[in-house]
Amino acid sequence: MPPAARSRSRTPVTPESLHDLVLLGAPALSPDGSRVAFVHKHIGKKNNYVTNIWMMDTDRGEPFQFTAGDRDGAPVWSPDGKSLAFVGGREKGAPQVYVMPSDGGEARALTELPEGAIYQLKWAPDGRHLAFCFREQAEDLTQAASKDRTEAGGTTPPLVTEDIFYRLDGDGYFGERRFKLFVVDVADGKHTMVYGKDTMGFFEYDWSPDGRRLAIATNRHKKAFHRPDRYELLILDLASGTLTPIPNMPEGPKASPTWSPNGRFIAYAGRVGKDWTYSTENLGLWVCDVRSGRARCLTDGTDWCLMAATLSDTSEASFDAWLKWSGNDRVLARIGWHGEAHIARFDRRGNSKPRTLTLGRIVIAPTNLSADGRRIVMTVDQPTAPSEIHVGRITANGITMKKRTSFNDDFVKRHSIAKPTTHWVRSADGTRVQAWVMRPPTGRGKRHPGILEVHGGPHAQYGWGFFHEFQVLANAGYVVVYSNPRGSKGYGRDFCHAIRGAWGTVDWEDIHAVAKWMQTREFIDTKRIGIMGGSYGGYMTNWAIGSTDMFTAAITDRCVSNLVSMAGNSDFPLEPNKYWPGNAWDKPEGLWASSPIRLMGNARTPTLVIHSEGDLRCNIEQGEQVFTALKQQNVPARFVRYPRETSHGMSRGGPPDMRLHRLDEILTWWKRWFSGKKRR
């Protein structure tokens, strides 16, 4: 059958196709490398996500469901491979640590924690203890307290805080409560809080190989939010409870501490200076001597950043660094570059150049290695197929990967999947900008309306990952173009740093250049080109409609419009004279210069505004300002407000019915304006 006929016989990807996808994550390789546990996620019958842990042999055989809790995740193997620990949400709002024999049986609740949140579950090397981070819910915000108030006719209590960091998008309001580190005895479930001095709100840790100590990357400064340079690597002696900072460490943020097998060194992600890990500066791979603190940055000879996350709407983009020791003298790290994500190997002493161990137009998300360091497990994402789990063999020259799951193979076979091509576009000053073009799977001989998608961040990247939204648009008959303008990660420090404190400058030049390039494509209807994006992508959409009338219509989603007001109402408030010059109260000029709301007097483009009332990253007032400005100037506009139960990440992790509603609104908007409807 010819390719065109095969495409016509397949089902288009629609918003409802989301129900057919299986999302895989958190694969965990057993210590002997023989089995893999992983999280299997799909949309359930009650507008919910069903997540269970599945299991499979590494080399052969079919995977099978291992747990039945429907809200299970974060599997970790015991050192002897006989048990699997995981976090289960059997009771809403009160996740617990569970342990289960790895050859099957009943899951045993190891903890009886009150309502709260758990993360970073790790086995001790002795196999008799587990460590985890837990933050208890405020007592008056628990479900029991809420029920009592409702019965008594009471009101939701106020939140009172004196700390600037009291909420986080997707996590909610936690006030001044912070995560603490606990160690639990696997035999009897007795747990002890061993560290509770982190003042920022989150920290990372690792067990020493002998199990007697913990390395903790943490900030204990009273004003931790303003002082990321005060992050330390602490050594906690579990027997005595003594906390000892590793001496002579460079000042700057530190994350993902990982102990070498011989216990002499700690690898971590960090940089020197007062920027957070999320920055225009590269986040480097460091190794320090545990005793002396002598530290070396292994990525200094490269232009790589350990925080170059590749965005998708079918997998959670991780901005956390991934690094693992391969023996005592080499460290593996994930590197994002030109829309790809791969694994690279670094020599601890810096005696040899880093070596990339994987290749291809794919996005790799590795997790852990076998105890002997010869095998590795990962998810592999590509633009024409959602993530599947692969197992790799590590050799001196690279990693040989084998695909081990095929949950989405049938989806790919049954649906018309658009295949992107990549191009490099010259911006006004000659800068090369990477872009991708996704043409409709059918009707390729025609001219189609074009949609320019702009990613969020902005310090992230589009790339070779699967995007359900892009497939929906392409199957609806639109050419989808997406690119990585300056400010994106994956192209070096200077490329990213070019927009620091100056959004709406060279980034807009790059986006504008891609839009003009679209006008030269013979398969795009030059009279029907739209622009859309979320978060920073919404910001750039706002900037575009205030700067040009070249777009037929626009969609601004969870946008940024006014940096002066956003400086104080985001979960991460903008710090004075840091990323942006000045401040929001008496020196707002820099913030205002980069605020697209000031350009709205020029806007004439019909615009759909999408925002969530529960968005703590970009407050809904950012979308309200755009909608109001457009309506008061008689510019066609539509405002879709999603409820408080949704957050900034709704498009990739929100309630399924809301995700489908959003995609339907998007399709309706493009159909309305690409059909030839007049603007006024």
Image: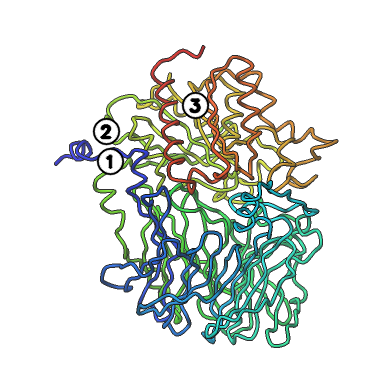
Q: Is residue 241 above or below residue 460?
A: below
Residue identifier under label 3: 516
Residues marked 1 and 2 touching at CB (< 8 Å): yes
Q: Amino acid at mark 2?
A: Thr
Horizontal side of residue 619 vs 130, given as left or right: right
Residues marked 2 and 3 touching at CB (< 8 Å): no
Q: Quadrant of residue 138?
A: bottom right
Could one spot residue 511 in this view of the protein? no
Residue identifier under label 1: 416
Where does the image place residue 302, in percent across and percent down from the top left? Answer: 59, 59
Q: Which mark is residue 442?
A: 2
Where does the image place residue 57, in percent across and percent down from the top left? Answer: 32, 74
Residue sitting at the far front: 152
Where does the image place residue 125, in percent across and percent down from the top left? Answer: 54, 84
Pointer 1 local density, CA inside 10 Å: few below 14, some 14–19, many at least 20: many
Q: CA distance from mark 1 to mark 2?
A: 8 Å
Q: Amino acid at mark 1?
A: Ser
Where does the image place residue 509, in percent across and percent down from the top left? Answer: 59, 31
Q: For the point 36% across and 67% down, which residue is it? A: 54
Mark 1 secondary-structure assignment: loop
